Amino acid sequence: MTSEGTRPRPDRRRRTWIRPTDEHSGVTTLELFFDLVFVFAITQVTAFMADDLGWRGALRGLVLLALMWWAWCSYAWLGNQARADEGVVRGAMIGAMAALFVVALCIPEAWGDEGGGISAPVLLAVCLGLVRLGHLGVYVIAAGGDASLRRTVLRTAVPVAVAAVLLVVGAVLGGATQTALWALALVVDYTGIYLLGGGWRLPAPGHFAERYGLIVIIALGESLIAVGVGATHLPVTVPIVAAALLGLTVSLAMWWLYFDVVAPVAERVLRGKQGQERVRLARDSYTYLHFPMVAGIIYLALGLKKVAQYVSGTDHHALTDPLKGTPLWALYGGVAAYLLAHLAFRERNVGSINRPRAVVVVVLLLAPLVVGSLPALAQLAVLAAVLVALIAFEVVRYAEARAAVRADEGHH
């Protein structure tokens, strides 16, 4: 019994298992460490697509990235429910890191095990299944006394388990059947969570927005790494330096387009929502709509890697050779996908469309047809020029609105 107005004493056993988050919780260092595994994984995905250059490799890379993305998102939500660096959640994060690291190691052989060891596709599928199902098991504990949240977690175990089975079966069968079953697993998991996951909680909106902002930064970092890797072990020449600086310009422009105004506005809108309205906004704006942003950056990284190889004279290419086919479409289409996701992100958050960015999306989708005969370095220069022009236009055209957003961000 407690007197009126006196809070009951917290359950010490539960407090040692989990530490709930609140409105002011931020990203923990363990979550940043967790993201380093994701960095390695997406680097592996880029290398995987570069080794199997064509539409098949691009599609398989997208499937791998979507699988990794869903695993990452699962733990972003878990870390919003309870602190990631405390109690049982800490153990779950470390275990998931280990499993995802193994997944990343398997990516080069995801569709073609080289023999002489454990089957890489099967190991990849099993580890992903353990990551997803283990996440739900810990979420039940993190839900504490919230019976409604526990029911939501248990409901979503059905599509997660079905997806895990499809992954393992696909890995055993291999080839085109593997691609089809893994894609089906994604459909089951993504739609199942959307349809059945109506009772999640989002107690720390700032943490959530920051979490996704950091993963965008990490993906942009991969785009920079791709340029460096593409020119590794080669003499530093003027074309290589030019390609590196142009690649940096493109990556920096994409950072600006997200973090200058878009990110702070989205976080402010998310903070302003409550209950299930906040949860649905977080689900749509971040978990779903940030995937095409990250995927677009990874395809850009593939294009940048190929530009670096062309200008350095590797792979039997000359400085004057143009990018063609998948690398060219990855370069321009990746940025187009990124901006298209921005349009959907803004529409979901504030109900309007950024028309200049919509125009640039169309320009980027048509550009490969126009710049197809230019040298690879010139193709990259055109892309950089388009993005710089877009930023310059927005800075001038929306100067007052931008200043207001930036000022408001400074107060927070």
Image (spheres, grey):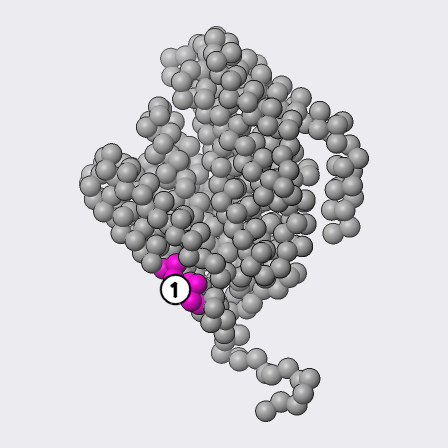
In the image, is 5 to the left or to the right of 161? right
Numbered label tally = 1
Q: Amino acid at mark 1?
A: Leu
> Compared with residue 263, is residue 396 higher up or lower down, i.e. above or below?
above
Q: Is residue 179 magenta?
A: no
Quadrant position of the N terminus in the picture: bottom right
**Relative to the observer, which residue lies in front, 30 or 121?**
121
At x 55%, y 46%, the residue is 285
Residue 27 visible in image: no
Q: Residues within 10 Å of mark 1 (few under 14, many from 20)?
A: some
Tag 1 residue: 154
At x 55%, y 51%, the residue is 282
In the image, is 75 to the left or to the right of 343? left
At x 66%, y 49%, the residue is 269
Q: Is residue 156 magenta?
A: yes
Please state the horizontal and vertical placement of residue 27, each as a whole percent of the image.
Answer: 59, 55
Which residue range is magenta in the image? 150-157
**Relative to the observer, which residue lies in front, 5 or 62?**
5
**Relative to the observer, which residue lies in front, 217 or 361?**
361
Residue farthest toward the front in the current orientation of the protein = 351
At x 71%, y 24%, the residue is 393
> Compared with residue 140, is residue 323 higher up or lower down, i.e. above or below?
above
Please state the horizontal and vertical placement of residue 322, each as a whole percent of the image.
Answer: 46, 12
SS type, badge 1: helix
